[in-house]
Image (tube, grey):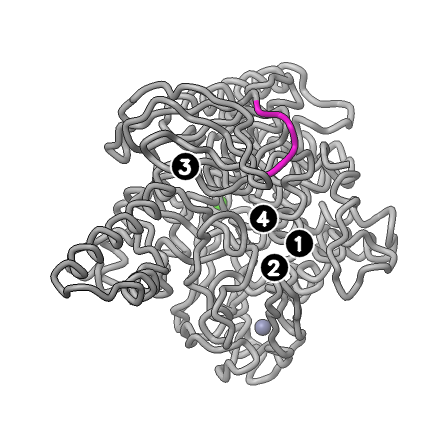
Amino acid sequence: MRGVARFMKLLPLELNAGRASRLSLPAWDAGGTHRPALLPDSRPRRIARNSSALSVNPLVAALLLALLVSAAVHAEEASLQVRLNTVGYLPEAQKKAAVAAPCSDFTVVRVKDGAKVMSGKATGPVLNEDTREQLFTADFSTLKEPGEYQLDVAGVGRSAPFRVAADVYRDPFYTVTRGMYLWRCGTAVSAKHNGRLFVHAACHTNDAWLDFVGGGHRQKDGIKGWHDAGDYNKYVVNAGVTVGAMFRAWENFGPRIRTVKLDLPESGGKLPDFLAELKWELDWLLTMQAPDGSVYHKLSTKNFGGFILPEREPAERYFTPWSSAATADFVAMLAQASRHFRPYDPAYADRCLESARKSYAFLKANPTNHNANLTGFRTGAYETRDTDDRLWATAEFWETAGETEGLRDLESRIKAGNATVDADFDWGNVKNLGLFTYLLSTRSGRDESLLKDLRESLLATADGIVKTCDAHGYERPLGGRYYWGCNGSVARQTLVLSAANRVSPKPEYRQTMLDALNHLFGRNYHGRSYVTGLGHRPPRHPHDRRSGGDTVDEPWPGYLVGGGHPKPANWQDIQDDYRTNEIAINWNGALIYALAAFLEESR
Ligand SMILES: [Ca+2]
Ligand SMILES: [Zn+2]
């Protein structure tokens, strides 16, 4: 705990308190020197292959070998100096690489025939403050012809291959959304990616015990839902920002999302695939409601388990006492669910609304913040004040039920928060989700002057993100801020930009959303994709118990890792480094939104 307390001082706001509750810190954090990991996996094999071709004087051989190794290493590292979106680009989008080495001329080379399809000159260098690098920029935006290419920078090397295509984010959307399916608890899951099979048997089918919520040593149904992150527990508050972002994706881009078949067990049934995936989580959430309408904060083992497959986890799991933040997030999610499931499953929509109404009544009767008593539990805490959660609950319940009393309550809550939209948010502050619902609602009766204030705040915040992005060497919308889970925040900022683009469309908003994807897929300090199974040299050793506990050498696919902090160089692709290399539903939920936003050009 001491290490955690020390580390917590580095974190802004309360965003990261839950994941920060991991108890043991990696060895390097306990005072050892910290070295960024950038070790090409194939180096030893290259040396062996090259040395077998040599059969001369040992001294000459050694010299030649040294030269060859140096050349091989240089070639490999050079490609990582040319940093761009290694998944690819929409044809009409801006296309820029950051080059972390002196350079001038570049060409774009088509992979299939080696043809040089364009050439240009890099600009710069400009000092990128947070990495202390002199970065050049190669702008190849005029490349619009669909295909697969590499950027060849004279004197530096070739980039990883990337695609230009209208459907370039379609497969990533599929893979990242299917990542939610692969997180399912209470069932066996199975999926193929790049020829490898990822599979586990039915897990946690006896969730969970009531000992800590006044039920004695008895069990009640708490199965289904998604495992939260690299661990197998289930936390209502983190479900909130995740489900909130995914429903917003459905609300904004539903018709396009519907064109992507997710190959779920439910596919072909009455629900669109995307909603079927959300229903797995909602069915679990419904089990988290106590008879009085309060909502249990989490369902968890007492301690984090080992790196084994979930069906082998032996420890008992418990419902923990309620919190007002979890109760409010529950109301918001179930209210959202009610209106989105209504066209496909009215009975389920009714059930969701009744459950939301019951917890909403409980919240009104218990208006003060109430943290869960988590004594005895050392897993994720996700503790947060409920002001923003209550605002979000009020917004979603009003949007679904349309009750005037709720609208007045919502507006007074928005005013109490000075009607400001935040540039960055996560599970600890879901206010933006409520504000977007209010702003983008088609219901009548809203306060025009409040709407005006809120629109202005949204646009000012979005303009600020655009400016921050443009000023950053890697065009990172979050600029130079790095903290626990910051890759998720980069993805989540697309919700703000997208809301602004709905209120007042501007190409810069869309471009900055794309810049978020560019950054996460390789235009970053590492020149690598931060999403398992996608793009160039993605993470191979995420802090994920399935990936560590199965027999497949590749990690489970479709997961965004948290990212380096307090400096970008602090990301390490090692399993123990949960601080920078864990995966989590709230980061994936945000990335799903970002990818869904660009499905529209797909077909
Ligand atoms: Ca909160
Ligand atoms: Zn499970």
Residue most extreme to the left: 59
SS assignment at label 2: loop
Verify whether residue 510 appears in magenta. no
**Residue 23 visible here:** no
Q: CA distance from mark 1 to mark 3?
A: 48 Å
The mark nearer the N terminus, 4 or 2, is 2
Residue denoted by label 1: 359
Q: Nearer the viewer, residue 100 or 156?
A: 156
Circle 4 sits on which residue? 589
- Report the amino acid beneath label 3: Arg
**What's the residue at 66%, 33% (across, down)?**
437
Give the magenta part as a residue range.
Answer: 143-148
Q: CA distance from mark 4 to mark 2?
A: 25 Å
User: Is 596 on the left-hand or right-hand side of 272?
Assistant: left
In the rendered structure, find residue 83 and report the number of the disc placed on it.
Answer: 3
**Marks 2 & 1, CB-CB < 8 Å contact:** yes
Q: Is residue 145 magenta?
A: yes
User: Distance from label 2 to label 1 (Cα)?
Assistant: 6 Å
The residue that label 2 is drawn on is: 294
Q: Quadrant of residue 106?
A: top left
- For the residue pair 292 and 300, the one nearer the viewer reads as 300
Tell me the distance, in whole angstroms, between the alpha carbons under discs 3 and 2.
Answer: 49 Å
